[in-house]
């Protein structure tokens, strides 16, 4: 059973469990991708090439065998210049939307047929590469253009049945897939299209389990909750008249979205994010909160919220979320593989391995940040965290026998 909400933090037992049950054993007989798995990062743009690099490098430093970076043609050479260890593919063309934030430009409107052909080519390219991997991280540095997000949405749908078994982390700009669609059903339809089957299949027993996780920070969570409340309507969230007024008030200022407030967690955030089930949510902050959002929220033995309280660094700098996303997708790929090796793995055991992977990714990220801060103080940058990841991992997990 996953840790109770009454717990003040995730314990060392969770990390030991992750080491024993999830981390793949290394052997001289293994081949590339067999133990550490193959990971893809879909992200990077002319303005934010570094974010895709951070996610990819963090995945590799955490133990993945091979990392693909699917980025824009403009960012491709920049990302390759950061590190020669990854396979970097120019998978989409930013020239289609250089004229504006929403993808509209003079050239795009005057060359619609050319853009349609380019879109189809980009979708095919992304789908081709993603068919090779065991985990996908979508969003770091991707940019805020609808066209690029449409590339991903079409490609994810094209992957069909396999998509539901490959862990996917939605971070940063990838979260726009959940709130930047106008029609009421789009976010729910998008989430379910990735898993192909109806949500009912994820309820109870040993049914299939969703391995998709969205990782919003506080501002991104505010946008998700606000979008869900606006699109669904407060009444549809089964709220009383009093709670309707409280929901409206809490959706006007991000500072009012305090996850330490039980009402905010249970009556606002939980109900609002249920719209996006079966995608789970790792809500980032001083204390991280894992929201299990796979349809088992009515089971008293399976708490919806799990607190993950590890101490990081007091210095906040850009890129730390990208690093967490890269580590998280790697550990989720391992957890999913460990369950697949035994088809008789129970739902309870599956949830436990999933939770331990999320907790371990938070631990490694925050511990690496703490070490980097010790070394560099106020001058610490996200790049300083990357080289600390292997040492943090080794100290926490490699002391376990048979690793």
Image (cartoon, rainbow, N blue to C red):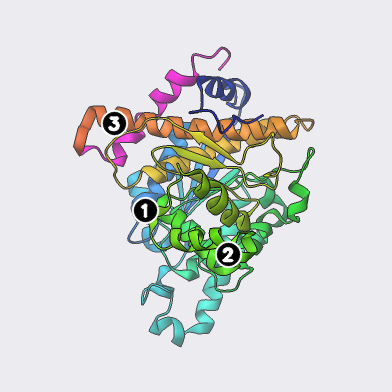
Q: Nearer the viewer, mark 3 or mark 2?
A: 2
Question: Residue 97 placed where, x, y %?
Answer: 41, 74
Read off the magenta span. Answer: 379-403
Q: Alpha carbon of mark 1 to alpha carbon of mark 2: how far?
A: 20 Å
- For mark 1, what is the residue? 255
Give the side of residue 46 with respect to residue 14, left or right. Answer: left
Q: Residue at image x 37%, y 58%? A: 75
Give the side of residue 327 with respect to residue 341, left or right. Answer: left
- Disc 2 residue crowd, few under 14, some 14–19, many 20+, Cα 10 Å: many
Q: Residue at image x 39%, y 47%? A: 53
The answer to whether marks 3 and 1 mark residues whose Cβ atoms lie closer than 8 Å is: no
Q: Residue at image x 67%, y 44%? A: 297
- Disc 3 residue crowd, few under 14, some 14–19, many 20+, Cα 10 Å: many
Nearer the observer, 322 or 206 = 206
Give the side of residue 384 with respect to residue 130, left or right. Answer: left
The answer to whether marks 3 and 2 mark residues whose Cβ atoms lie closer than 8 Å is: no
Is 392 one of the magenta-colored residues?
Answer: yes
- For mark 2, what is the residue? 234
Question: Residue 133 placed where, x, y %?
Answer: 60, 45
Q: Main secondary structure of the magenta part?
A: helix
- For mark 3, what is the residue? 372
Question: Residue 391 placed where, x, y %?
Answer: 39, 23
Question: Residue 292 placed where, x, y %?
Answer: 61, 43
Quadrant of the image occupied by residue 25 = top right
The quadrant of the rendering that contains the N terminus is top right
The quadrant of the rendering that contains the C terminus is top right
Q: Nearer the viewer, mark 3 or mark 1?
A: 1
Is 86 one of the magenta-colored residues?
Answer: no
The tag earlier along the polypeptide, 1 or 2, is 2
């Amino acid at each position: 059973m996953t840790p109770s909400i009454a717990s003040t933090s995730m314990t060392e037992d969770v990390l030991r469990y992750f080491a024993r049950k999830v981390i793949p054993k290394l052997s001289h007989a293994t081949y590339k991708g067999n133990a550490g798995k193959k990971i893809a990062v879909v992200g990077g743009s002319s303005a934010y090439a570094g974010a895709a690099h951070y996610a990819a490098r963090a995945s590799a430093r955490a133990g993945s065998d091979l990392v693909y970076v699917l980025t824009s043609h403009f960012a491709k050479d920049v990302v390759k210049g950061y590190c020669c260890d990854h396979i970097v593919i120019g998978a989409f063309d930013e020239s289609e939307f250089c004229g504006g934030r929403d993808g509209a430009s003079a050239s795009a409107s005057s060359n619609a047929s050319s853009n349609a052909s380019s879109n189809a080519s980009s979708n095919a390219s992304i789908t081709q590469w993603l068919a090779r991997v065991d985990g996908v991280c979508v969003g770091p540095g991707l940019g805020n253009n609808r066209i690029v997000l449409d590339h991903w949405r079409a490609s994810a749908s094209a992957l069909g049945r396999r998509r539901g078994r490959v862990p996917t982390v939605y971070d940063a700009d990838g979260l726009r897939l959940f709130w930047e669609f106008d029609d009421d059903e789009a976010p729910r339809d998008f989430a379910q299209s990735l898993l192909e089957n109806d949500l009912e299949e994820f309820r109870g027993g040993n049914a299939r389990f969703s391995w998709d996780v969205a990782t919003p920070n506080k501002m991104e969570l505010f946008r998700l909750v606000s979008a869900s409340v606006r699109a669904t309507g407060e009444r549809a969230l089964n709220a009383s008249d009093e709670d309707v007024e409280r929901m409206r008030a809490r959706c006007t200022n991000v500072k009012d979205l305090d996850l330490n407030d039980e009402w905010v967690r249970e009556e606002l955030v939980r109900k609002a994010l249920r719209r996006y089930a079966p995608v789970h949510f790792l809500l980032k902050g001083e204390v991280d909160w894992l929201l299990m959002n796979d349809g088992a929220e009515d089971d008293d033995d399976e708490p919806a919220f799990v607190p993950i309280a590890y101490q990081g660094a007091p210095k906040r700098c850009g890129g730390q979320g990208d690093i967490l996303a890269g580590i998280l997708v790697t550990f989720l790929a391992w957890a999913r593989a460990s369950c697949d090796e035994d088809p008789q793995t129970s739902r309870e055991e599956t949830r436990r391995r999933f939770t331990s992977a999320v907790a371990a990714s938070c631990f490694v990220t925050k511990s690496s940040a703490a070490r980097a801060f010790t070394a560099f103080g106020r001058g610490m940058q996200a790049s300083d965290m990357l080289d600390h990841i292997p040492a943090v991992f080794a100290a926490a997990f490699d002391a376990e026998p048979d690793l």
